[in-house]
Image: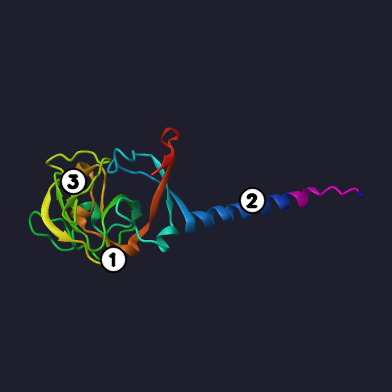
Amino acid sequence: MVKKPQSTAGSLLELVLIVAVALGLALGIQKFLIKPYRIPSGSMLPTLRVGQRVLVNRIGHSFSKPAVGDVVVFHPPRGAQQGQCGVLPPRGQVCLKEVPIPDGENFIKRVVAGPGDRLKIVGGHVYRNGREASEPFTKPCSPAGGCSFPREVTIPAGHYFMMGDNRGSSDDSRFWGPVPDKWIIGGAFATYWPPGRIGLL
């Protein structure tokens, strides 16, 4: 039995349906599962360069909490770009209380301490729970870059302390406070552009 050739109109309709379904799946994946992000600044050097692109797992955060060392995308507190802290800290202490309203912008930083961790920063190096953290991925901090906050603090419940790997050139939790769990969008797990830097984070 010979199959009747499909009409031009039928073929066009089928093509439109295939494209619509593919587009819907792509948008659904981006909205709920994986989303690409472009690195806007040098705050994560040398790990991530300006213009580099990463993939962020949006669904994983719903089932597990971020771990120290994870690179995450999140909404910072309002005023973060101006270094605004919710409550002015004592001299030698990081900001411990964020402005309680999230900003519409997205930031990408590394988790350096989680809920209940004791934290201080000396020369750009994190001391967590009394011990210096092993951070071979960081760029050295110049004395003028907000390098030392030797007064120890305890990270509040449900909050995460974020820092850029470029410690001397990063606006991060040192200045505007820890980030509430509910403001975290997801963890960056891979970089896909430029081709020479494709790989897992």
The three-letter code of the residue at mark 1 reads Gly
Question: Where 144 sits versus 116, above or below?
Answer: above
Q: CA distance from mark 1 to mark 2?
A: 42 Å
Q: Which mark is residue 158?
A: 1
At x 17% / y 51%, what residue is drawn? 131
Could you give the CA–CA distance between mark 3 and mark 1, rounded to whole angstroms? 23 Å
| Residue pointed to by mark 2 | 19
In the rendered image, residue 109, in percent from the top left (x then y), is placed at 30, 49
Extent of the magenta region: 2-11
Placement of 88 over or under 122, stated as above or below: below
Looking at the image, which is closer to me, 56 or 75? 56
Depth check: 201 or 39 in front? 201
Q: Badge 1: how crowded within 10 Å, few (<14), some, or many (20+)?
A: some
How many marks are shown on the rendered structure?
3
- Judge depth for marks 1 and 2 and give the one in front: 1
Residue at 75% x, 49% y: name it.
11
Q: Quadrant of the C terminus?
A: top left
Q: Earlier in the sequence, mark 3 or mark 1?
A: 3
Amino acid at circle 3: His
